[in-house]
């Protein structure tokens, strides 16, 4: 049985399967980050809906491309912070602590913590792609339909706000991993006595 569990841990089930298994989709609406992002996304969507309807095409498109130019490097920097956080988190758990976590069959919980970094990394990548689309829309001489502008602005606003709050939540995860490491290292010492 231990061999079967070890084999299932060594193989990554894939992003979609992990989102479903860890119920990460609930983070979008059932957390404080999700609720605040939903409110912020609605405000951003409504603002851009009205602003695109009341502004000349060239001026509005220029603003779109300028916003994208500001946010894309910021999101790339955020992706770097997430990667550094994952490196810190995975490097801070000692082999001894990992073995004890595995013995107590809590390895899936630990993988769930690491998956949070993977999850937010994919969301950042998706948001960057959306900003690239916005950038090219801003370069075009064509008017963007206010309804579609509002919808796109809602999604981008929602994701941007969600990423900021979710990343801050991951800092807490990194701090808690320190205590998990300490607890499971101490457990090994207690077992030896």
Image (tube, helix red, strand yellow):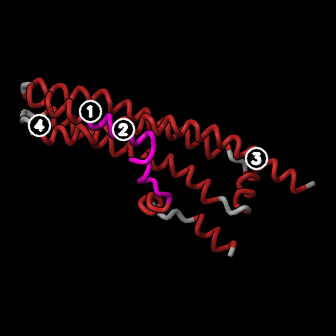
User: Which quadrant is home to the N terminus?
Assistant: bottom right
Disc 1 or 2, which lies upstream in sequence?
2
* Residue highlighted by disc 1: 43
Magenta span: chief secondary structure: helix
Total labels: the figure holds 4
* Residue highlighted by disc 2: 37
Mark closer to the observer (4, 1): 1
Highlighted magenta segment, given as a residue range: 22-44
Q: Residue furthest bottom?
A: 1
Q: Residue furthest right?
A: 193
Q: Is residue 12 above or below residue 51?
A: below
Residue 132, position as x, y percentages in the image: 25, 39
Question: Which of the 4 quarters of the picture holds residue 124?
Answer: top left
What whole-number distance in Å separates the C-alpha atoms at marks 1 and 2? 10 Å
Whether residue 23 is in magenta: the answer is yes
Q: Is residue 101 left or right of residue 30?
A: right
Between 122 and 25, the residue placed more toward the observer is: 25
Residue 146 is labelled as 4
- Tag 4 near tag 1, CB within 8 Å: no
Q: Is residue 144 above or below residue 189?
A: above
Residue at 14% from the left image edge and 27% from the top image edge:
51
* Residue highlighted by disc 3: 183
Between 7 and 170, the residue placed more toward the observer is: 170
- Tag 3 near tag 1, CB within 8 Å: no
């Amino acid at each position: 049985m231990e061999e079967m569990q070890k084999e299932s841990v060594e193989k990554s089930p894939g992003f979609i399967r992990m989102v479903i298994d860890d119920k990460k989709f609930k983070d979008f609406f059932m957390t404080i980050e999700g609720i605040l992002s939903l409110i912020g996304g609605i405000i951003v969507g409504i603002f851009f809906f009205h602003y695109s309807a009341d502004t000349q095409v060239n001026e509005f498109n220029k603003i779109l491309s300028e916003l994208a130019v500001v946010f894309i490097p910021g999101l790339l920097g955020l992706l770097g912070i997430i990667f550094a956080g994952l490196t810190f988190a995975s490097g801070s758990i000692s082999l001894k602590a990992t073995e004890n976590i595995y013995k107590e069959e809590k390895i899936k919980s630990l993988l769930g913590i690491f998956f949070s970094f993977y999850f937010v990394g994919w969301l950042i990548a998706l948001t960057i792609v959306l900003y690239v689309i916005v950038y090219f829309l801003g370069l075009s001489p064509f008017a963007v339909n206010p309804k579609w502008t509002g919808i796109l602005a809602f999604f981008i606003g929602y994701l941007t706000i969600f990423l900021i709050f979710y990343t801050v939540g991951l800092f807490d995860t990194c701090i808690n991993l320190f205590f998990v490491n300490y607890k499971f290292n101490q457990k090994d010492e207690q077992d030896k006595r």
